[in-house]
């Protein structure tokens, strides 16, 4: 950890070390400070699964302890060359496997609005930093809702661009067909300023090379809510969401509902695809070329690999590797993996239908308030997976989406999530700006 | 006996299949990068040239080429495989249902696909103290895998198949000349019902040895009324035997899923635009069928060089097949090693010399000498001495051979002796017409 690292934001200086002692948002911190008042220089953080030359990249996993990548992720490199100074790497659920930030091999970030509650996951530290540090820009990553969820729980804007908009070069993979790098911030102006910087084709990630130009000017007039989406949403969240809908109507936006029955298949399909891909991505971590290794080399590679993986991978990582390996097996592949691929197409076409008549699809972001750590311990894996029911569908479909703070229950934030058609991030930026104008988010009281 | 082969051949590209590292390097672990080391956050980017070469091979074997193709992760744990999955093609090979004609017999090709090679494990150190080191220079080297149907009926035919396949590949896509030792094959063989797969046999000779051993082993088992187990075996080169592979070593369930980082490639236009050079086999068949060349001679011509074959075909049109065979198998083959590198420059003159000879404007000796001169790069026009010289040579020759003048008085054909001698002495530097003219005029003066 760097000593005396400070964040200089909006004229205020923060002692990062002290902040981190309270909130646990950073996993590894830079020793750099930025003196002066140069407007073009800004500070940002990167989720721990983004590769950076000067800091460790451990993706929240013990198995990557000590790993310093020899290259910068494209998104990080682009921010640096635009004048960005990297403050640190933010804590996360191991490899992105989690909804609350609690599956970290390192520290678990605490919710800035209530330290007894979770930040949400998996970009937990990113949302926490964006909430606590004024003017902060956090790079997050979403596979199945890992930007929206913590943005909602920490009361910040979380923008997840279209799949392929931001190069994934240098992103430590969870599910390659789902992973998207995006932004978390309390300062809505950052979205318009920084999205164009991290976007754009990168020859080192072929999936980024088919994108149309980013168009930021857009208009939002009609928003639709999927009928079933409010089932299972807690009463206090629902009430806050209903009030937000009224505010939207006052802003001249027409809000209607329509049935979107296929969205409920998104969750199982997502978990099959994400774990299938994850189980192949995690195969490389075996204590041979980087990261933790177990000391006994004098054995066959099979037991050596097993021992390293057993010791340094967390519980949820093991669960997802096993799930994903199972769904790829001969005899199950057609029943699970192939069927999930077909379901993804179904979800995409359901959204396409909704977008024929509407500019955005709207739901609450999470079905409940940021949970207390004490309550999370009692949740089964299935309960946790179900919490992703509203954030997973746009992620599975590769659609851009935005979580915006829409109200507070007992001082704890509630978020709403807008989804827009592929490549139309401009609608979300416009929506965020006009919403922020009428209903700016509350800042948490910073405890040092 | 039924034999099916899965042949792996390295494609001749300068960079690897999914990164820009060089495909050749002197020192271990010098041609490596984050991608071919599988570092977290690295990504594959397809080498277009490798795709083109793969499609060329698929079309050469008359495979059906799909509109779209993609790559697949084949997951297994082995220390030389940095990501612990190989990027290969499972459900969308670049070619399917092709064929290869081997000595007039059709060997059906099941599929052709691309994949990357793992690194190499090296055991080093004194006996008893060996350690394993891994060289990742090979990691990511582009391979094409060609899978046959079980249409091969003997180990020697399998060897011939691979030999002829490599010849074609060398000519059509420029596969390296050391292909015969570096080629690897999985060999499937069944003498009766059950099939045995001998994995990862390296080199032409070993492919035949492994299959021979396996055929004998299976026959012995059957004679002893013992079952042949359906299993995977490996070939131990030193002892020349196949042994059962440990179950773990070749796990059957690779858990194939699509490679999401590469996406789908629409290859129809690329495949259609490729110009496929004719392979030696096809040329040979045409030399036999169209030009009436004996098969052994045709094989000799194409195996010498495909440009020799094309020179032959040109001559066959200009001077007829018989004369073309005589010239090509005779003087041209004799000078071929020197002629081939200069062929682009002198081909027209070579053809012109042969036409002159067959039409009687030039003697055979003269034609042969001219071809030699062209092969050696002697420029006839500049080396040719001024006219005076040849007259001097004729005069001194007649001075040394006074009896020839007398013979000439009796019979003019005696002049041929002088002409022949001087032609040989001047090695074709002068045209026969000039020599004849010089000799005749000198002799007539002396009568």
Image: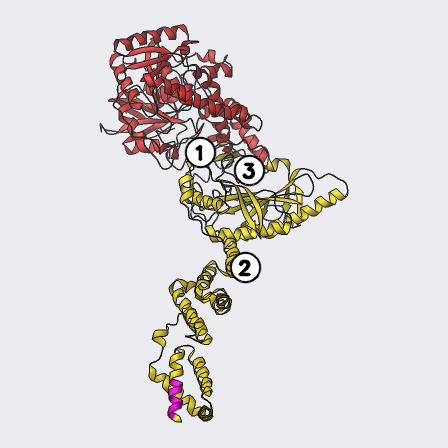
| Residue segment shown in magenta | B438-445
Which chain comes out red in the rendered image?
A
What shade does chain B have? yellow
Image position of B206 with respect to B83: above or below: below
Q: Name the mark nearer the viewer: 3 or 2.
A: 2
The quadrant holding residue A46 is top left
Q: Position of residue B12 (x, y in %)?
A: 46, 49
- Kindly identify which residue carries mark 2: B299
Q: Marks 3 and 2, how far apart in space?
A: 44 Å
Q: Position of residue B330 (x, y in %)?
A: 50, 69
Left or right of residue B274, residue B127 in this image: right
- Tell me whether the residue at label 3 lies in contact with that at label 1, contact meaning CB atoms closer than 8 angstroms: no
User: In the structure shown, which secondary structural element does the residue marked by tag 3 occupy?
Assistant: loop
Residue B44 among magenta residues: no
Q: Classify 10 Å Cα crowding around label 3: few (below 14), some (14-19), many (20 and above).
A: some
Asked whether residue A320 appears in the rendered view, the answer is yes
Mark 1 or 2, nearer chain start: 1
Q: Name the mark nearer the viewer: 1 or 2.
A: 2
- Kindly identify which residue carries mark 3: B78
- Kindly identify which residue carries mark 1: B40
- Identity of the residue drawn at 25% across and 23% down: A217
Q: Position of residue A240 (x, y in %)?
A: 35, 7
Report the predominant secondary structure element of the magenta stretch: helix
User: In the structure shown, which secondary structural element does the residue marked by tag 1 occupy?
Assistant: loop
Q: Are marks 1 and 2 on the same chain?
A: yes
Image position of B64 with respect to B425: above or below: above
Image position of B401 with respect to A372: above or below: below
User: In the structure shown, which secondary structural element does the residue marked by tag 2 occupy?
Assistant: helix
Left or right of residue A435, residue A105 in this image: right
């Amino acid at each position: 950890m760097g000593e005396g690292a400070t964040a200089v934001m909006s004229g205020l200086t923060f002692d990062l070390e002290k902040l981190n002692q309270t909130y646990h948002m950073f996993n590894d911190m830079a020793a750099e400070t930025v003196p002066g008042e140069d407007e073009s220089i800004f500070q940002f953080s990167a989720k721990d699964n983004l590769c950076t030359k000067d800091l460790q990249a451990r993706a929240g996993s013990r198995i990557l302890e000590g790993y310093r990548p020899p290259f910068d992720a494209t998104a990080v490199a682009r921010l640096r060359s635009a004048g960005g100074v990297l403050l640190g790497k933010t804590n996360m659920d191991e490899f992105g496997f989690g909804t609350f930030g609690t599956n970290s091999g390192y520290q678990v970030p605490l919710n800035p609005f209530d330290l007894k509650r979770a930040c949400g996951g998996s970009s937990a530290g990113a949302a926490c930093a964006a909430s606590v540090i004024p003017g902060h820009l956090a790079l997050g990553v979403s596979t199945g809702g890992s930007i929206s969820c913590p943005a909602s729980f920490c009361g910040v804007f979380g923008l997840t661009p279209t799949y392929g908009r931001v190069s994934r070069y240098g992103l430590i993979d969870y599910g390659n067909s789902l992973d998207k790098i995006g932004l978390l911030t309390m300062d809505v102006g950052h979205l318009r300023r920084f999205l164009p910087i991290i976007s754009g084709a990168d020859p080192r990630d072929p999936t980024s090379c088919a994108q149309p130009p980013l168009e930021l000017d857009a208009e939002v007039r009609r928003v639709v809510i999927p009928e079933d989406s409010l089932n299972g949403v807690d009463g206090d969240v629902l009430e806050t969401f209903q009030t937000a809908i009224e505010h939207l109507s006052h802003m001249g936006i027409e809000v209607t509902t329509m049935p979107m029955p296929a969205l409920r298949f998104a969750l199982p399909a997502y978990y099959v695809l994400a774990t299938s891909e994850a189980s192949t991505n995690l195969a490389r971590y075996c204590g041979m070329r980087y990261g933790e290794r177990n000391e006994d080399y004098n054995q066959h590679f099979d037991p050596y690999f097993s021992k390293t993986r057993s010791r340094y991978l967390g519980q949820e990582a093991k669960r997802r590797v096993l799930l994903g390996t199972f769904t790829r097996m001969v005899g199950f592949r057609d029943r699970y993996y192939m069927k999930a691929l077909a379901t993804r197409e179904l979800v995409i076409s359901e959204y396409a239908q909704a977008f024929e008549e509407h500019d955005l699809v709207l739901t609450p972001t999470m079905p409940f308030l940021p949970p207390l750590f004490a309550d999370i311990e009692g949740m089964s894996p299935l309960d946790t997976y179900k919490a992703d029911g509203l954030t997973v569908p746009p992620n599975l479909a590769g659609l851009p989406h935005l979580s915006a703070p829409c109200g507070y229950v007992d001082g704890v934030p509630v978020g709403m999530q807008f989804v827009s058609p592929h490549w139309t991030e401009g609608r979300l930026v416009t929506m965020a700006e006009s919403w922020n104008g009428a209903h700016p988010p509350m800042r948490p009281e910073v405890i040092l | 006996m039924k034999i099916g082969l899965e042949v792996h051949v390295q494609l001749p590209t300068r960079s690897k299949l999914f990164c820009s590292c060089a495909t050749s390097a002197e020192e271990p672990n010098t041609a490596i990068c984050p991608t071919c080391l599988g570092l977290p956050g690295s990504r594959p980017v397809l080498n277009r040239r490798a795709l083109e070469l793969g499609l060329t091979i698929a079309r050469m074997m008359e495979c059906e080429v799909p509109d779209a193709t993609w790559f697949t992760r084949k997951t297994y744990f082995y220390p030389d495989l940095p990501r612990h999955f190989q990027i290969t093609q499972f459900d969308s090979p670049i070619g399917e249902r092709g064929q290869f004609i081997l000595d007039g017999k059709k060997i059906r090709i099941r599929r052709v696909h691309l994949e990357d090679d793992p690194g190499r494990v090296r055991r080093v150190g004194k006996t008893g103290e060996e350690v394993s080191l891994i060289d990742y220079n090979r990691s990511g080297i582009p391979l094409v895998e060609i899978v046959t149907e079980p249409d091969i009926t003997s180990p020697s035919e399998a060897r011939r198949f691979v030999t002829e396949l490599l010849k074609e590949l060398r000519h059509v896509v420029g596969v390296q000349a050391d292909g015969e030792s570096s080629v690897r094959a999985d060999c499937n063989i069944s003498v009766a019902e059950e099939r045995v797969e001998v994995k990862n046999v390296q080199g032409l000779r070993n492919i035949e040895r492994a299959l021979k051993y396996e055929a004998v082993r299976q026959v012995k088992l059957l004679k002893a009324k013992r079952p042949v187990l359906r299993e995977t075996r490996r070939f131990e080169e030193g002892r020349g035997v196949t042994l059962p592979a440990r179950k773990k070593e070749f796990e059957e369930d690779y858990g194939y899923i699509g490679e999401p980082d590469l996406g789908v490639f629409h290859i129809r236009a690329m495949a259609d635009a490729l110009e496929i050079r004719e392979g030696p086999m096809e040329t040979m068949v045409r030399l036999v069928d169209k030009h009436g060349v004996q098969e052994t001679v045709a094989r000799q011509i194409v195996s010498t060089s495909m440009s020799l074959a094309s020179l032959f075909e040109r001559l066959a049109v200009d001077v007829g097949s018989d004369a073309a065979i005589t010239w090509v198998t005779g003087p041209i083959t004799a000078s071929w090693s020197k002629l081939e590198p200069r062929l682009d420059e002198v081909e027209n003159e070579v053809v012109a010399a042969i036409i002159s000879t067959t039409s009687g404007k030039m003697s055979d000796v003269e034609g042969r000498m001219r071809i030699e001169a062209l092969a050696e790069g002697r420029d006839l026009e500049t080396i040719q001495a001024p006219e005076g010289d040849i007259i001097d040579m004729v005069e001194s020759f007649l001075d040394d051979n006074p009896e020839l003048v007398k013979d000439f008085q009796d019979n003019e054909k005696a002049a041929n002796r002088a002409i022949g001698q001087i032609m040989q002495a001047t090695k074709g530097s002068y045209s026969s017409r000039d020599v004849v003219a010089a000799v005749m005029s000198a002799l007539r003066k002396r009568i």
